[in-house]
Image: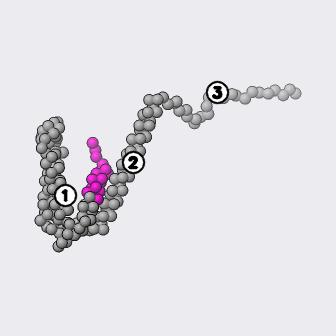
Amino acid sequence: RCLLRVPTTIRTMAPLGTKYQRVPTDEEEKRNKKRRSEAAELVSTKVQAFAWLVVGGFVFYQTDLPKAIFQDPKVHRLWVDVAAACFAINCVLCFYLTVWIPYVLKLDVEWNAYCPRVIPTMTAVALLCGVALIRGLWPLWGLLTPLILAITFMACVMSLHFIPWPF
């Protein structure tokens, strides 16, 4: 009896399930790096916005802000009413710029070309609103009033990060 050695099949292909990756070029590396940095920046922004929301919520809860503004007898009601009027004016102007001009009037003109004085007016009214609110709430919290209102304002601004926009 002769023992023959039968050669086994030689695999020239990779086993099933093995995936090959392309060797990245400089352009692909740059795109991947840019994509990663944009994702990291987005996550960082969301984390910071969430932190502002947590701190703002804590301040809002601890100071009992709505009750303090509307019911506390120490509050200077005239200044709080001036701040509320300024806030209402800014809301109307914001509605005018974001809804009325593009959707009702159907204008494709930029704001600064169609109504160049609205943004400076909104800025002045917002500053007056902030000063009036600080002045109105000063007897309640004293030196902490600007800090409390600044934290609450930042929390309100950062909450916009979590509103799903369809655009």
Residue highlighted by disc 2: 43
Give the secondary structure at mark 1: helix
> For the residues carrying marks 3 and 2, which lies nearer the camera in this image?
2
Given residues 59 and 147, the one toward you in this image is: 147
Q: Is residue 19 above or below residue 129?
A: above
Front-most of residues 137 and 100: 137
Q: Which residue of the protein is positioned furthest toward the bottom in this rendering?
A: 73
Local packing at callout 3 (Cα closer than 10 Å; few below 14, some 14-19, many 20+) is few
| Number of other residues with Cα within 10 Å of mark 2, as a class: few under 14, some 14 to 19, many 20 or more | few
From this view, report whether residue 57 is shown above or below residue 157.
below
Nearer mark to the viewer, of 2 and 1: 1
Quadrant of image for the N terminus: top right
The answer to whether the residue labelled 2 contacts the one labelled 1, judged by CB atoms less than 8 Å apart, is no
The tag earlier along the polypeptide, 3 or 2, is 3
Query: Quarter of the image holding residue 152?
Result: bottom left
Query: Splitting the image into 4 quarters, where does residue 113 fall?
Result: top left
- Amino acid of disc 1: Gly
**Residue 18 percent across, percent down from the top left:** 58, 35
What numbered label is drawn on residue 12?
A: 3
**Which residue is identified by label 1?**
130
Residue type at tag 3: Thr
Mark in front: 1 vs 3: 1
Region in magenta: 151-167
* Residue at 20% across, 66% down: 138
Q: Quadrant of residue 51?
A: bottom left
Return the residue found at the far right. Answer: 1
Q: Amino acid at mark 2?
A: Val
